[in-house]
Image (cartoon, rainbow, N blue to C red):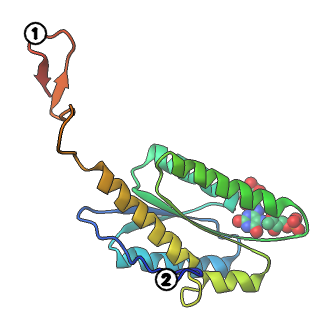
Amino acid sequence: MAGHSDNDMGLPGFDKPVKVAIVIAPYYTAIAEAQLAAARSVLEQAGADHEVIEVPGSLEIPTAIGIAHRLSNFDGYVALGCVIRGATSHYDVVVNESSRALTLLGMQGVCIGNGIITVENRAQAEERADASRLNTAGGAAAAALHLIALTRRFGKPKGGVGFRTRPDVIEVAGDSEGTTTA
Ligand SMILES: Nc1c(NC[C@H](O)[C@H](O)[C@H](O)CO)[nH]c(=O)[nH]c1=O
Ligand SMILES: CC(=O)[C@@H](O)COP(=O)(O)O
């Protein structure tokens, strides 16, 4: 289980390979190392291949995911970062805008587990980054895997009524044959 949740959903199984990008902002080195280890452990338990993409700060994580989603072929993403409140309102900008941007990507169907820690102090960050304590990065990895599994569950060819296209057939309007085979 991760965070304060008492509900352990376990991990989904996959019958086809899964490719995940861990997009991490190692703003605080030791925190990032703990988050990365925790996320990797979960992805390895699920048999998911993964790559690590580093960005300077948490504000860059959504942009990096957007770029990777547009230009690469990852099934999902684990966003890892740590934002510790300072003396100004910049904390609110980083926290609110990074989470908002990740949510907007998610609403477009990008499978993202958000493991960006947003805390008041270093001790809170360490507790959440530690896989043996609140394990928020492990939870984010599990969340991404569950969204990938959901996508595959709903993306399976449907039986039942209704027209559906076939990948080997190109429908050409007005063609007397109606179809050509690709
Ligand atoms: N203060 C923290 C930041 N700030 C940097 C921003 O995320 C961003 O990289 C910068 O504004 C340039 O665009 N980032 C964190 O991840 N954690 C912080 O505590
Ligand atoms: C979360 C932040 O952006 C923070 O580290 C910046 O610190 P400060 O508000 O003291 O400039």
Residue to which mark 1 is pinned = 176
User: Residue 127: percent from the left, percent from the top?
Assistant: 66, 86
Badge 1 element: loop
* Amino acid type assigned to the residue bearing label 2 in the image: Met
Answer with left or right where residue 25 lies relative to residue 70. right
Answer with left or right where residue 84 lies relative to residue 159. right
User: Residue 33: percent from the left, percent from the top?
Assistant: 59, 79
The image quadrant where one finds ligand 2 is bottom right
User: Residue 120: percent from the left, percent from the top?
Assistant: 79, 76
Q: Please, is residue 34 above or below residue 169 in the view?
A: below
Extreme right residue here? 87
The local crowd at label 1, few if under 14, some if 14 to 19, many if 20 or more residues have their Cα within 10 Å, is: few
Q: Residue at x 65, y 70 (%)?
A: 26
* Amino acid type assigned to the residue bearing label 1 in the image: Ser
Answer with left or right where residue 19 lies relative to residue 110. left
Q: Quadrant of the C terminus?
A: top left
Answer with left or right where residue 91 lies relative to residue 22. right
Q: Please, is residue 179 above or below residue 110 in the view?
A: above
Q: Find residue 153 and report its image quarter.
A: bottom left
Q: Find residue 161 and report its image quarter.
A: top left
Q: Are the residues flagged by discs 1 and 2 in contact, CB closer than 8 Å?
A: no
User: Residue 114: percent from the left, percent from the top?
Assistant: 57, 64
Residue to which mark 2 is pinned = 1
The local crowd at label 2, few if under 14, some if 14 to 19, many if 20 or more residues have their Cα within 10 Å, is: some
